[in-house]
Image (spheres, rainbow, N blue to C red):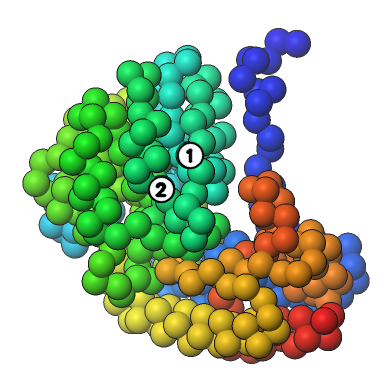
């Protein structure tokens, strides 16, 4: 075969089933998707208007460096534009990081229950994934992560909150961890769900960037609380030196004109955040209560999803729910064979999911 050998190690990422496909396959009219941690309230009305206006200008290339969006983010985050890079979703920035820093055989550390894209990006760079077991309460083990660092370590990926467990590492844990991380290792904190968190113990990673720490990168996205998952746009925050290196491997015009305009408009609508948080807290509280009443084990989550352990196979339950027009996420790929990850939906969607579970029990 002519393909690179590293491709033999990579399994194709399997996204959640789209609603249209479930309708076609099963012949059901009502389908509820609680699989991909999307915002059930949708995007801001300001973003929708920006998309409409931008659609008439798509004959020209987008702003190649995301100049206006970078400046807006930098202003809100109280950093400089040279601290920001825009990506086709934060997934693209993950791949930029491995392209920029990982040589064949170099090591990249990630948790054994962390976001699977870290592994794929490392394999594509022909690096070596080092998987650190999570703690018994399904949290990132920063002590074990430090123990795994060697002279070949280039990047450490930490998703905080973690996907799919929903757990976090707190301010003190992170401070102790970063005090010991070698300065020639890039520590990447993926904060895709940070807007949902109101816990005062959640680490303020921006302080490390503002203080000039060179080897930290923060990843954030417009896919979750901003409701722009379909437009694929995210951003990274780091030192100017790191951002310059990422720009060297960034594809030209990597984010669309429409996505940039929608993201800019979203930042002008703080009520979008408030609505998203309120819906999420109400939904989580309801799901916790109802799942526990069914004797389902639930992991407390800081994201917009819940990890639940069932007394039957997660894959089996996924198939049964699918026949009822409810899409959730089985986690067999993580070795969590009796778990499902369930996104928090609207009030009516959460109720339909629980009613379906009660029928199946």
Q: Secondary structure at mark 1?
A: strand
Q: Is residue 350 visible?
A: no
The quarter of the picture where residue 25 lies is bottom right
Q: Is residue 75 visible?
A: yes
Q: Is residue 42 left or right of residue 342?
A: left
The one of 242 and 207 positioned closer to us in this rendering = 207
At horizontal 67% and vertical 48% (from top left) the residue drawn is 335
| Residue that label 1 marks | 132
**Label 1 – label 2 distance at C-alpha:** 7 Å
Q: Is residue 170 left or right of residue 311?
A: left
At horizontal 79% and vertical 62% (from top left) the residue drawn is 313
Q: Is residue 177 left or right of residue 43?
A: left
The quarter of the picture where residue 249 lies is top left
Name, please, the residue furthest toward the top.
2
At horizontal 45% and vertical 82% (from top left) the residue drawn is 281
**Residue 17 at what x, y percent from top left?**
73, 59
> Disc count in the image?
2
The one of 268 and 279 positioned closer to us in this rendering = 279
**Which of marks 2 and 1 precedes in the sequence?**
1
| Residue that label 2 marks | 141
**Residue 225 at what x, y percent from top left?**
43, 69
Q: Which quarter of the figure is the C terminus placed in? A: bottom right
**Residue 26 at what x, y percent from top left?**
89, 68
At horizontal 78% and vertical 86% (from top left) the residue drawn is 358
């Amino acid at each position: 075969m002519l393909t690179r050998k590293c491709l033999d190690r990579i399994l194709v990422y399997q996204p959640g089933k789209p609603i249209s496909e479930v309708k076609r396959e099963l012949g059901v009219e009502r389908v509820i998707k609680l699989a991909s941690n999307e915002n059930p309230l949708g995007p801001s009305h300001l973003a929708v208007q920006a998309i409409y206006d931008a659609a008439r200008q798509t004959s020209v290339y987008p702003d190649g460096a995301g100049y206006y969006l970078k400046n807006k983010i930098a202003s809100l985050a109280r950093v400089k534009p040279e601290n920001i890079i825009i990506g086709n979703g934060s997934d693209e920035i993950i791949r930029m990081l491995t392209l920029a820093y990982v040589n064949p055989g170099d090591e990249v550390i990630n948790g054994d229950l962390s976001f699977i894209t870290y592994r794929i990006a490392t394999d594509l760079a022909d690096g070596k994934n080092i998987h650190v077991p999570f703690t018994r309460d399904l949290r990132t083990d920063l002590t074990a992560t430090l123990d795994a660092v060697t002279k070949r370590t280039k990047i450490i990926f930490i998703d905080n909150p973690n996907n799919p467990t929903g757990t976090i590492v707190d301010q003190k844990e992170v401070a102790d961890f970063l005090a010991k991380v070698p300065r020639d290792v890039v520590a990447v904190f993926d904060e895709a769900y940070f807007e949902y968190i109101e816990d005062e113990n959640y680490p303020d990673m921006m302080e490390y960037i503002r203080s000039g720490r060179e080897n930290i990168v923060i990843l954030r996205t417009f896919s979750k609380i901003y409701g722009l998952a379909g437009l694929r746009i995210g951003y990274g925050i780091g030192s100017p030196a790191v951002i310059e290196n990422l720009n060297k491997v960034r594809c030209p015009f990597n984010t669309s004109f429409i996505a940039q305009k929608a993201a800019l408009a979203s930042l002008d609508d703080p009520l979008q955040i408030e609505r998203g948080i309120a819906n999420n807290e109400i939904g989580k509280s309801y799901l916790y209560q109802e799942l526990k009443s069914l004797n389902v084990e639930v992991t407390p989550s800081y994201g917009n999803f819940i990890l639940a352990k069932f007394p039957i196979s997660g894959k089996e339950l996924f198939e049964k729910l699918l026949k009822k027009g409810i899409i959730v996420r089985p986690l067999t790929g993580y070795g969590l064979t009796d778990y499902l990850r369930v996104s928090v939906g609207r009030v009516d969607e959460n109720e339909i999911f629980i009613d379906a579970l009660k029928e199946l029990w």
